[in-house]
């Protein structure tokens, strides 16, 4: 039986009309039986929808931003379709629905659920437009609602996957369709059993591709990016990067844990469990070799790999009663972090304080301060960067340690981490 292959196209690969035409070429040259194509929102649409939501939350005028987003999507359609194509009314309709949804009251209590419903319009729009375009170009494919595939709980904005229900749904919805045509679906979004729209966390479309691949026991997953593969550093920040040809699952998982944005951190595990290879290829140079992530335990990377994570907060909890930091203080801080679903990116303790580096997340820092303020004296700095260097060498030590603007640093046998001002 032919196994399915899963392709994932992120925002940059569908950011405008010419990008979508390029996507069509990439697919056409690789058409095969049983393809699932997972697509993100176009370009920076998700950020834009987040912005609309922020405006709505603070009761500022969000309509003009909706109008801009609508205009951008329609402009892309005008480049891809003749005037009478039904896609225009499909897009108009989605915007009407979006505006109607935005008329519902928004408050702190329903923020996360509201967020998921609103931001997922980005993926609905992109997949509708791309599906219509591919069909028009005689690349026939079937549009599939990801909410019928990806089953999650109701932890909105970082929903947890119900793997067995998802596998059932994927088989039920996809197996027959894939025998006939490629299937296009949205990344990032899913639904709870009660039918509420959920999302898997920012940049979650890679994870969606992995979930579907796992559920279908697919042959491979390919993520199409604007970089030639997985590099040892972000080429937008560092010159002279080196591309890896092969990376072991474990190594790749660690890189994503530290914040390598090339792949969503949850992507590797399901693929590694079924030994499904993950290709990272360039949509700019699709013939290039890219990087394969798979079982390569002997692949040793001696070159330093640099990962930068933005939007970090450094919080320091200081004891106020002249005791020393002990396990119960640690326990207390960690219990609160767990309750708020905040992960620690770096930790350091001293005689009288615990310092932790966290991702900036709306409302969560506030809640943390509120909850812990009566037990500890708390200081924090936000807008920071966390830089991790794996397999560091002397040069990387010089480059990153003991610099101005560094607030916290750590060196282990294989890794350097610094929290610093950007
Ligand atoms: N569109 C979503 C985001 O920008 C999901 C994704 O692109 O993977 O976060
Ligand atoms: Mg993206």
Image (tube, helix red, strand yellow):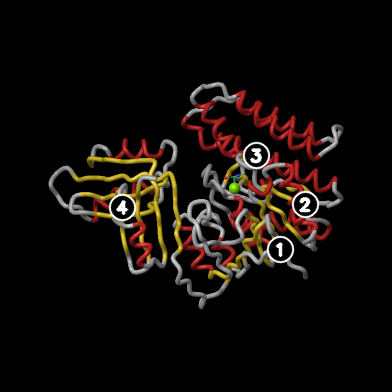
Query: Which label's residue is closer to the chain start, 2 or 4?
Result: 2
Residue topped by disc 2: 24
Q: Secondary structure at mark 3?
A: helix
For marks 3 and 2 on the same chain, the one whose residue lies earlier in the sequence:
2
Separation (CA) of disc 1 from disc 2: 14 Å
Counting residues from the start of the chain, the first of labels 1 and 2 encountered is 2
Residues at discs 4 and 1 in contact (Cβ within 8 Å): no
The quadrant holding residue 275 is bottom right
Query: Is disc 1 in contact with disc 3, using a CB cutoff of under 8 Å?
Result: no
Per the image, the residue denoted by label 4 is: 403
Residue 235 is at least partly visible in this image: yes
Residue 327: image location, x then y, percent: 24, 56
Which marked residue is nearer to the observer: mark 1 or mark 2?
1
Residue located at (71% from left, 63% from top)? 287
**Does 166 sit left or right of 297 as displayed?**
right
Q: Is residue 174 above or below residue 374?
A: below
Residue 285, placed above or below residue 355: below
Instruction: Judge left or right: residue 215 versus residue 139.
Output: left
Residue depth check, mark 1 versus mark 3: number of the one nearer the observer? 1
Q: Residue 186, labelled with which disc?
A: none
Tell me the crowding category of disc 3: few under 14, some 14 to 19, or many 20 or more residues within 10 angstroms, Cα based: many
Does any portion of residue 217 appear in the rendered image? no
Q: Residues within 10 Å of mark 2 (few under 14, many from 20)?
A: some
Name the residue tied to disc 1.
Answer: 287
From mark 3 to mark 4, how far is it between C-alphas? Answer: 41 Å
Above or below 93: residue 382: below
Q: Callout 1: few (<14), some (14-19), or many (20+) C-alpha neighbours within 10 Å? A: few
Question: Alpha carbon of mark 2 to alpha carbon of mark 4: how far?
Answer: 47 Å
Disc 4 versus disc 1: distance between alpha carbons? 41 Å
Q: Position of residue 12 (x, y in %)?
A: 64, 47
Q: Residue at x 56, y 48 (%)?
A: 203
| Residue behind mark 3 | 122
């Amino acid at each position: 039986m032919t196994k399915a292959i899963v392709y994932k196209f992120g925002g940059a690969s569908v950011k405008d009309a010419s990008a979508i035409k390029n996507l069509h070429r990439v697919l056409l040259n690789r058409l095969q039986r049983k393809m699932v194509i997972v697509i993100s929102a176009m370009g920076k649409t998700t950020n834009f929808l987040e912005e609309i939501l922020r405006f709505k939350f603070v009761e500022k005028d969000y309509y003009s931003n909706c109008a801009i987003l609508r205009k951008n999507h329609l402009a892309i359609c005008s480049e891809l379709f003749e005037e009478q194509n039904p896609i225009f009314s499909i897009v108009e309709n989605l915007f009407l629905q979006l505006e109607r949804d935005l008329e519902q009251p928004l408050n702190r209590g329903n923020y996360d659920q509201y967020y998921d419903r609103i931001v997922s319009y980005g993926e609905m729009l992109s997949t509708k437009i791309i599906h219509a375009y591919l069909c028009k170009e005689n690349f026939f494919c079937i549009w599939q609602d990801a909410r019928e595939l990806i089953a999650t709980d109701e932890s909105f904005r970082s929903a947890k996957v119900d793997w067995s229900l998802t596998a059932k749904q994927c088989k039920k919805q996809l197996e027959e369709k894939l025998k006939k045509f490629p299937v296009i679906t949205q990344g990032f979004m899913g639904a709870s059993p009660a039918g509420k729209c959920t999302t898997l966390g920012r940049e979650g479309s890679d994870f969606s591709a992995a979930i579907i691949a796992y559920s279908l026991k697919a042959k491979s997953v390919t993520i199409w990016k604007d970089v030639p593969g997985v590099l040892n550093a972000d080429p937008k920040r560092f010159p002279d990067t080196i591309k890896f040809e092969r990376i072991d699952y474990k190594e790749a998982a660690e890189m994503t844990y530290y914040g390598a944005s090339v792949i969503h951190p949850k992507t590797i595990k399901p693929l590694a469990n079924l030994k499904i290879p993950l290709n990272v290829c360039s949509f700019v140079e699709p013939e290039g070799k890219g990087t394969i992530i798979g079982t390569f335990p002997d692949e040793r990377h001696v070159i330093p790999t640099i990962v930068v994570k933005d939007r970090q907060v450094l919080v320091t909890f200081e004891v106020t009663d002249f005791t020393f930091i002990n396990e119960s203080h640690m326990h207390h801080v960690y219990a609160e972090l767990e309750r708020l679903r905040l992960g620690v990116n770096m930790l350091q303790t001293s005689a009288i304080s615990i310092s932790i580096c966290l991702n900036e997340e709306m409302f969560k820092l506030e809640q943390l301060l509120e909850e812990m303020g009566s037990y500890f004296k708390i200081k924090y700095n936000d807008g920071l960067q966390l830089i991790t260097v794996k397999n560091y060498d002397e040069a990387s030590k010089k480059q990153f340690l003991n610099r101005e603007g560094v607030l916290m640093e750590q060196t282990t046998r294989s890794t350097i981490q610094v929290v610093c001002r950007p």
